[in-house]
Every structure is written in C-alpha cells, then in structure tokens.
Amino acid sequence: MGEPKHARHFCGKLAPSITCFTDETTLPYETYGLQQGKRGELMSPAVVAASVRALARGSSQGKPIGDAKMLPGTFIVDRQGVIQYAYYSKHAGDHPRIDDLIAAAKALA
C-alpha cells in the first residue's frame, strides 16, 4: 500500500528485475483476503520480538503509509495469474521464511 514513488524506490532497490505495483487503497488487501489486525495482532509479545530481531539486523520502521493496521501477506503468482503460494501473516512482524519463498518460486520454474 503506497504511492507509485514508493514502489519505484523499494522495487528498484530490492528487486530491480521485476515489475512492482502499488495501490493507495486497501482494495488489493481485501482482494487477497488480508484484513486489519486487531490489537493483539498489532501489539503483542510476538510483535515486540519481531521488532527486536529487525532492529538487531539494522532494520527500522519508517513512517507508516496508508492503513498501518493492515496485516501483511506474501503471494507468489504465476504467469497465468494463479496464486501458487500464499502466506497470511499472523501479526505485523510475521513474514514467511525466505527459504520457503525460494522453494515455492523454484517450483514454478
């Protein structure tokens, strides 16, 4: 969720070989079945632990853009537009393991 300039910045920096899209509304979240987090999903011991791990790796939270209560999700979509992998985060700091994403992507190749 963000403005096109955010997609250009992060995609160009993190994934320059792919096309990234952004939307300033929550419609894509709703389309993929993602929802706003409740208090326990936004402020819990698991979120604090994820925050500490991120800070230890040198990552920090920037200024929130859009609806900061939306829980994240990660999807791998094939060339036909079919979702081949879906990960619905349990809280704001919950993300799939990179090894799982790489394995799912390789399975499509």
Image: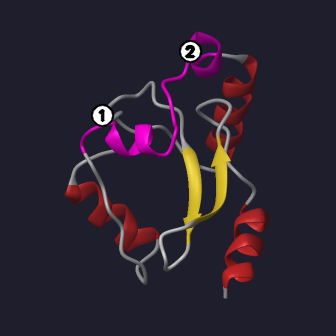
From the viewer's side, name the closer residue of 77 and 37: 77
Label 2 residue SS: loop
Q: Earlier in the sequence, mark 2 or mark 1?
A: 2
Task: Please give the residue where the numbered disc 2 appears in the rendered image.
Answer: 38
Q: Which residue is drawn at 21% across and 58% down?
A: 5
Q: Mark 1 points at which residue?
A: 66
When the figure is inspected, residue 107 is found, relative to residue 81, above or below; the finding is below
- Would residue 8 be counted in the magenta stretch? no
Asked if residue 52 lies left or right of residue 31, the reply is right
- Residue at image position (63%, 36%) is 93
The type of residue carrying mark 1 is: Gly
The quarter of the picture where the N terminus appears is top left
Quick check: 35 above or below 85? above
> How far across and how far down the image is residue 105, in percent?
67, 76
Q: In this view, does 45 lie to the left or right of 20?
A: right
Q: In which quarter of the image is residue 13?
A: bottom left
Query: In the current view of this chain or complex, which residue is farthest to the bottom?
Result: 109
Q: Which amino acid does label 2 sit on?
A: Lys
Q: Is residue 39 magenta?
A: yes
Q: Which residue is drawn at 78% across and 67% down?
A: 99
Q: Which of 57 and 33 is in front in this view?
A: 33
Please determine whether, in this image, residue 94 is positioned above or below residue 9: above
Q: Which residue range is magenta in the image? A: 24-43
Q: Residues within 10 Å of mark 2 (few under 14, many from 20)?
A: few
Separation (CA) of disc 2 from disc 1: 17 Å
Residue at 64%, 33% in the rendered image: 51
Q: Where in the figure is residue 44, as x and y percent of width and height?
A: 69, 16
Give the SS element for disc 1.
Answer: loop
Answer with left or right where residue 53 lies relative to residue 73.
right
- Quarter residue 109 falls in: bottom right
